[in-house]
Each structure stands twice: as structure tokens, then as C-alpha cells.
């Protein structure tokens, strides 16, 4: 039996038909953007269990607790920035030492707070702290005075949160951080007497 040859016009018709099917399929794929029809997209777009629980936790946090977290983060960032400046510009070895202690302790507390905030569904940024402008001629006195004021205020705020905050984890963190703040205040007051 002799094989039949396919004519060039027949090949062209087949090519046009195949191309048309490809184009129609591509257009339909673009039109059907529903996630429901594609199990792969549905799995990727569905919120995970932890994302859902983080959202529900964030909704449960009171405004008071949210404000405490944000204020504590801002204060901690400022303490780190000022502490770094004290390490560099402090006139006495004691002020440099206090600055280094502030950097170490408040960096640790900031990291703990960032993790706690994440668990509560909040995002805080502790990477952009700016130091205050202290007069270099009176640096030690100005720095110590500002640390005294800041820590007196912080201790009151942390005591209030530890005793009457709404979220148990945030209250616990505030209570755990309080002794460090009190140590800082005692160090600063000691240095101011000298």
C-alpha cells in the first residue's frame, strides 16, 4: 500500500487550527482568574493557621497594650542610640560604661519585644533610632539627666503595665524588664552624685 501524501494546504489548515486552540486556551486561562478552579493557587493563597491566629490575636489586643508596646519600642530604640553616643562622646569612663550597659540591655529588651509583638500580630521596627543632640561640653551631665528622667518615666509606665495590662504575656514582659530599668536608674543616680 502506498502512503498518502498530505498536501501543503492541509498542513497549513492543521497548523492554523492547532494555533487557534493554543490561543483560545491562553485567553481562557487569563479570563479564569478564580482561585477556586486551581488547587495549587488555592493552597498558596489560603491564609495559614498561624497567620489566622496572629490576626485574631492582634484584634484581641487592647489599644492600651498596643500603645505600651509601641512606646516601649520607641523608648528602647532611643536608649540604644543615646547609649552608643555616650560610648563615643562620654567624657568620663563611668558615662561610657553606662552608655554601653544601656546599649546591651535595651538591645536585648528590644529584640524580646519585637518577638513578643510578632506573636501578637504586630510589626514594630527598632532599627532606626536616632540619638538626641547633647552639648559636647556638658555631655555627661545632659546625658545622665535625660537618662534619669527617661527611666523614672519608664519605670512608672512599666509598673502600670505589669499590674494592669490586659494581655498576660505583655504584663509578664513588663514585669521581667522592670528590674533592669530600676538598675539603670540606680546607676545613673550614682553617677550623678559623683
Image: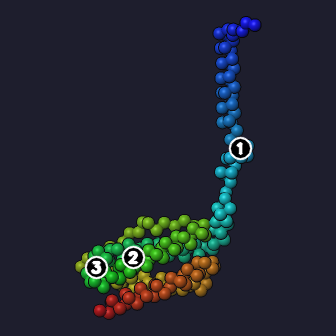
- Tell me the mark number nearer the camera, choosing from 2 and 3: 2
Report which quarter residue 51 is drawn in.
Answer: bottom right
Q: Residue at x 57, y 84 (%)?
A: 162
Look at the image and tell me in which quarter the N terminus lies: top right
User: Can you say whether 27 is above or below 54 in the image?
Assistant: above
| Label 1 to label 2: alpha-carbon separation | 51 Å
Q: Which residue in the protein does label 3 denote?
A: 90
Q: Which residue in the protein does label 2 denote?
A: 103
Q: Position of residue 113 (x, y in %)?
A: 52, 73
| Label 2 to label 3: alpha-carbon separation | 14 Å
Q: Earlier in the sequence, mark 2 or mark 3?
A: 3
Q: Position of residue 30 (x, y in %)?
A: 66, 36
Q: 161 or 92: which is nearer to us?
A: 92
**Could you classify mark 1 by the number of other residues whose Cα lies within 10 Å: few (under 14), some (14-19), or many (20 or more)?**
few
| Label 1 to label 3: alpha-carbon separation | 63 Å
Q: Which residue in the protein does label 1 denote?
A: 38
Q: On the picture, is 100 further left or further right than 12?
A: left
Q: Is residue 76 visible?
A: no
Q: Position of residue 143 (x, y in %)?
A: 33, 81
* SS class, disc 1: loop
Q: Earlier in the sequence, mark 1 or mark 3?
A: 1
Amino acid at each position: 500500500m502506498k502512503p498518502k501524501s498530505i498536501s501543503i494546504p492541509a498542513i497549513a489548515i492543521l497548523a492554523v487550527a492547532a494555533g487557534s486552540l493554543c490561543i483560545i486556551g491562553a485567553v481562557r486561562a487569563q479570563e479564569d482568574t478564580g482561585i477556586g478552579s486551581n488547587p495549587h493557587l488555592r493552597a498558596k493563597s489560603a491564609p495559614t493557621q498561624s497567620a489566622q491566629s496572629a490576626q485574631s490575636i492582634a484584634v484581641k489586643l487592647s489599644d492600651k497594650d498596643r500603645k505600651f508596646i509601641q512606646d516601649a519600642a520607641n523608648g528602647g530604640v532611643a536608649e540604644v542610640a543615646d547609649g552608643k553616643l555616650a560610648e563615643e562622646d562620654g567624657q568620663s569612663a563611668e558615662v561610657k560604661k553606662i552608655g554601653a550597659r544601656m546599649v546591651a540591655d535595651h538591645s536585648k529588651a528590644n529584640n524580646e519585644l519585637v518577638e513578643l509583638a510578632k506573636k501578637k500580630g504586630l510589626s514594630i521596627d527598632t532599627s532606626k533610632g536616632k540619638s538626641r543632640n547633647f552639648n559636647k561640653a556638658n555631655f555627661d551631665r545632659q546625658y545622665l539627666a535625660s537618662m534619669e528622667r527617661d527611666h523614672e518615666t519608664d519605670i512608672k509606665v512599666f509598673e502600670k503595665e505589669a499590674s494592669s495590662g490586659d494581655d498576660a504575656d505583655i504584663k509578664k514582659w513588663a514585669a521581667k524588664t522592670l528590674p533592669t530599668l530600676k538598675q539603670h536608674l540606680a546607676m545613673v543616680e550614682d553617677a550623678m552624685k559623683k
